[in-house]
Image: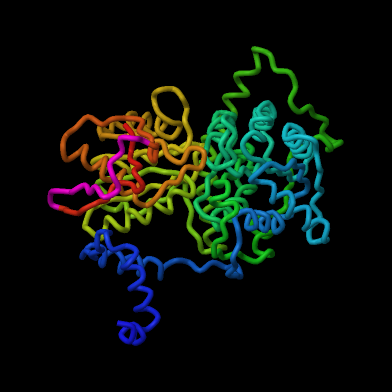
Amino acid sequence: MASKEKNLNAEEQAMQAIDAVNMNQTPSVESPFDVEYKADKKKRDGSKTKGTALKKRDRMSGNEAVALAIKQVNPDVMPAFPITPSTELPQMVSTYISNGEIDTEFIPVESEHSSMSAAIGASAAGARALTATSSAGLAFMWEELYIAASDRLPLVLCLVNRTLTGPLNINCDHSDSMGARDSGWLQVYAETNEEAYDNFIMAYRVTEHPDVRLPMMVCYDGFITSHAVMNIETIDTASVREFVGEYEPDNFLLNKDMPMAVGPYANSPFYMETKYNQRNAMKNAKKVILDVCAEYEKVSGRKYSLFEEYRMEDAKYAIVIMGSAAGQTKDAVDKLREYGIHVGMIKVRVFRPFPGEELAQALKHCLSVAIMDRAESFSGMGGPLGSELKAAMFDAGLDIPVVNYFYGLGGRDYTVTEARDVFKDIREIVRRGAEPVQFKYIGLRDRNANKPEDIFEFKGPDQMDIRVSGDGVKISE
């Protein structure tokens, strides 16, 4: 046996080791559809624009990538107060400043409330401003978030998503940003480090547009994205600065030729008009975001939109999700497609403005849909994404079984296997004609969970076996 192993090359030895670890896993069988899809994908990838910018391959954490984007944009003012897991952003930017690499004015402050107050003041004075925070830091800014939006100030907040206390937790979920979803800020979410980098570069082009002029949160998942290192592709600084351009505000406090007030008292005859104008700006932002994405594709070669459709061309069953967990879901989609099961995924990139009509259109051919929330709203009627998308689908006249799931709260793992189990769950609803059970928690510890060796059998035209979530964890109803 020893002599036989010596004759194996490195690849064969690696495959033998993998087989030994995964001996109980269901074997992969590449379906004709999968072969066809890969050929089509190769053709589509070959037709992508390469972009005009010079590119560089690098390895960076999400925080490093966004800090680089900040350096390349070179904003005027950055007040900040450190809080995990966004602490590295002001640390890295202040290092760039100390080294003379950018001329951004860094303002150390005594709290997150003060950092947003200083950013508001800088933006009102005519500067291009930003700050960064997470979790309780965002909650401490609450009052100021509404002021920034109602004053129509085009500042940017890098929000590294972290769960809100309590109990005390420093890991990722979306409870911080979702708590601020109605504050009037634009919100964009990233799946990867590269996407977080791109989102920041595009942010000022959207916020400073005269039809928008609303602040934007550039959100990405704490630790999962902020601290994990990935291979990314950056673009050259000259191309970034040409794309973003110089900020030339029409009205600002330091303009001596046009005296003005920012944030004055607005009593009953005026307040509603302010909100109506904010609403129109939020509606306008959809088109502006799409236009900016199209321009950025010409520079970077990377295509973005309000959301990403992954293998949705003929999907019967779909998961709708946000943030880094889209990666595991894509892996689950690819695995199930190998068995000929027509599944797909939609990754919501822009949550504010909410693309309800567009999402409903993308889901209209599905037989059932799973909507995944990484934050509880405690309404008893679902999470933020679930309740808003269900309403949009109802308005579009879609009569499709939809289940709202909660996952990843407080940093709980969300695995490829669990994503496959969700697809199994929504598929069984259609096959059995059962009434869907709503608001399930994925990965919840349960003493009555099925044992890891239990296997669910898929019957019907597209057969497969699928293992329940490992370690005695199951979807809890």
Span shown in magenta: 446-461
* Quadrant (top left, top right, bottom left, bottom right) of the N terminus: bottom left
Q: Is residue 151 above or below residue 245?
A: above
Determine the residue positioned at 26% across, 63% down: 28
Determine the residue positioned at 52% across, 59% down: 297
Q: Is residue 326 above or below residue 444?
A: below
Relative image position of residue 326 (x, y in whole percent): 43, 50
Chief secondary structure of the magenta portion: loop
Quarter holding residue 47? bottom left
Determine the residue positioned at 68% across, 43% down: 132
Relative image position of residue 410 (x, y in whole percent): 51, 38
**Residue 270 appears anywhere in the view:** yes
Determine the residue positioned at 72% across, 52% down: 246
Most foreground residue, 381 or 37 = 381
Most foreground residue, 33 or 60 = 60
Most foreground residue, 78 or 122 = 78
Residue projecting furthest to the left: 460
Relative image position of residue 445 (x, y in whole percent): 39, 37
**Residue 156 appears anywhere in the view:** no
Most foreground residue, 343 or 362 = 343
Q: Is residue 131 left or right of residue 299?
A: right
Which colour style is shown? Answer: rainbow
Residue 459 magenta: yes
